[in-house]
Image: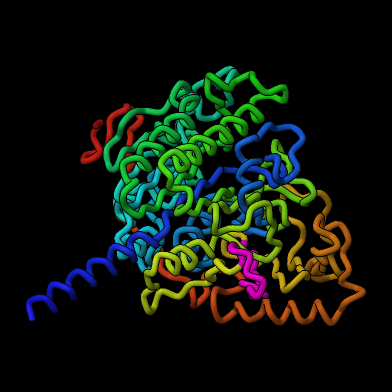
């Protein structure tokens, strides 16, 4: 009997060890405001990106991967597996000292991976709320280092409103007009804090801006080394290449195409450092790395052949350059043209980790591992995809057809034509033959227009066509929100300098 029990215990231990051995690591490298064609694998002729070129050669390009038009919504989709409007129903983005943040009713990918025994770390820009209940350390991450929002959300005197080398703007009085529950705007914004877990590490001025990519990269590599012997999830959302542009001192002036290209090339170096340590530690064969951008590029970026920029629901505002890498698991040098996006990260990682999505936590994303692995029998993850800008549904896609429901958004060239006495006429594009959304074919395909209008109408009883729909979850909310770092440079109580 004793031998039987010992044998059973050994078998259980071996089964547990084998299960742990088969759990992959996950790394998501999320760049801020990178254009579709800012890197070599997606056609850049300006920026030298040898590490991303190699990553594409060894992995898979996702050419139809969707984020959101702006920062906070995109990150909410990545964290929760949902359309942004479901879990962060706000008109735009979050700002410092905002009273609202990501809904507490939806579990994050970090929280779910922790249930499967994963170590979790976030290094970089969070942007889902900066008040204590909203921080990464309260949403499933064991470790956090970063600026909790965009690197332009600080005082002009600290360099937050101007690029490297520009003359600092003159000091201005704080302007409180327009501030609301989403936080402080413009010249009312407090100094930028660099947090480590829940302590202010330093005040981010120009030198700190210029060193932010290297600081994040060093911390990311350290996290990988420290957790080499266990399954881990590392989320690395860079502040680069968001305005203000601050390439590191080793990179500034090295590109022939200006400081924006300098910063893109420094980001490529950072990716190379992450992949190199995985190879060195022999973790490459058990680590899935996803490289992407939180939205389309601004007008300083290159989004060709897409039309539009950040802040629009045109393809150039939401379709982002994405690479998936896992040597031996993801077929090298391949391309996937299927509709995928930020909302697929959670269901894919959770499935690969052997975890479960709790009942009641509805997700809009899908497990796209069959597409990533090149399964020839993989089915489309999304036959229909909805393009929300804040609270408004602006476009819908089904298959190759995309119907723009509203007039062209700011940042797009040209204006939507209005029907006499009525709203702007919807525009229909075939993205397979017209990726640049140059030719409206609505008049030639009224039946397709009607089909997509009917699909759009289905959102009326879920997320809503405009405003808060019944499927939107309540925002996280705090009373009396306070900056983490005051205008006097003093940290909020409980967040004192570490």
| Closer to us: 306 or 282 | 282
x%, y% of residue 276?
A: 49, 37
Magenta-colored stretch includes residue 380: yes
Q: Residue 302's spot in the image, x, y percent?
A: 73, 41
Give the farthest residue toward the right. 444
Question: Looking at the picture, does residue 215 appear above or below residue 226?
Answer: above
- Does residue 226 lie above or below 2 as drawn? above
Of the pair 94 and 194, the residue shown nearer to us:
194
The residue depicted at 51 percent of the width and 46 percent of the height is: 29
Which residue is at the front of the view, 324 or 94? 324
- Residue at point 60%, 79% (across, down): 460
> Whole-percent x and y of residue 465?
62, 72
Whether residue 298 is visible to the viewer of this picture, yes or no, is yes
Q: Which residues are magenta?
A: 371-388
Q: Position of residue 482 (x, y in %)?
A: 32, 44
Residue at horizontal 33%, vertical 37%? 195
């Amino acid at each position: 009997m004793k031998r039987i029990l010992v044998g059973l215990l050994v078998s259980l231990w071996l089964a547990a060890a084998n299960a742990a051995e088969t759990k992959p690591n996950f790394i998501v490298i999320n760049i801020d405001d990178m254009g579709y064609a800012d890197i070599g694998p997606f056609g850049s002729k300006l920026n030298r990106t040898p590490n991303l070129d190699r990553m594409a050669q060894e992995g898979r390009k996702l050419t139809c991967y969707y984020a959101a038009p702006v920062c906070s919504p995109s990150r909410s989709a990545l964290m929760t597996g949902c359309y942004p409007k479901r879990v962060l129903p706000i008109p735009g983005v979050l700002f410092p000292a905002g009273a609202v943040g990501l809904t507490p009713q939806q579990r994050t990918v970090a929280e779910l991976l922790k249930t499967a025994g994963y170590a979790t770390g976030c290094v970089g820009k969070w942007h889902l709320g900066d008040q204590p209940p909203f921080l990464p350390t309260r949403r499933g991450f064991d470790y956090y280092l970063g600026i909790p929002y965009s690197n332009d959300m600080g005082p002009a005197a600290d360099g937050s409103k101007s690029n490297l080398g520009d003359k600092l703007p003159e000091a201005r009085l704080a302007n409180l007009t327009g501030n609301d529950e989403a936080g402080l705007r413009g010249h009312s914004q407090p100094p930028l804090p660099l947090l480590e877990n829940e302590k202010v590490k330093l005040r981010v001025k120009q030198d700190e801006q210029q060193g932010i990519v290297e600081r994040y990269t060093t911390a990311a590599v350290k996290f990988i080394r420290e957790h080499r012997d266990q399954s881990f999830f590392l989320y690395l959302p860079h502040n680069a290449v968001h305005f203000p542009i601050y390439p590191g001192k080793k990179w500034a002036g090295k590109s022939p195409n200006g400081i924006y290209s300098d910063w893109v090339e420094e980001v490529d170096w950072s990716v190379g450092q992450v992949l190199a340590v995985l190879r060195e530690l022999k973790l490459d064969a058990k680590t899935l790395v996803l490289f992407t951008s939180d939205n389309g590029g601004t007008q300083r970026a290159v989004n060709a052949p897409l039309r539009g920029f950040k802040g629009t629901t045109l393809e150039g505002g939401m379709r982002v350059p994405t690479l998936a890498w896992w040597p031996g698991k993801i077929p090298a040098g391949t391309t996937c043209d299927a509709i995928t996006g930020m909302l697929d990260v959670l269901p894919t990682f959770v499935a690969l980790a052997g975890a479960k999505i709790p009942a009641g936590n509805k997700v809009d994303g899908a497990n796209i591992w069959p597409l990533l692995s090149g399964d020839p029998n993989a089915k489309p993850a999304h036959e229909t995809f909805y393009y929300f800008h804040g609270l408004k549904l602006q476009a819908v896609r089904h298959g190759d057809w995309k119907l723009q429901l509203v007039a062209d958004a700011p940042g797009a060239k040209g204006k939507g034509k209005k029907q006499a006495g009525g709203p702007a006429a919807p525009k229909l594009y075939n993205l397979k033959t017209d990726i640049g959304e140059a030719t409206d074919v609505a008049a030639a395909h009224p039946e397709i227009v009607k089909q997509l209008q009917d699909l759009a109408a289905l959102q009326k009883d879920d997320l809503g066509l405009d405003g808060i729909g019944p499927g939107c979850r309540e925002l996280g909310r705090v009373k009396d929100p306070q900056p983490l770092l005051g205008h006097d440079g003093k940290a909020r109580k409980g967040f004192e300098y570490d």
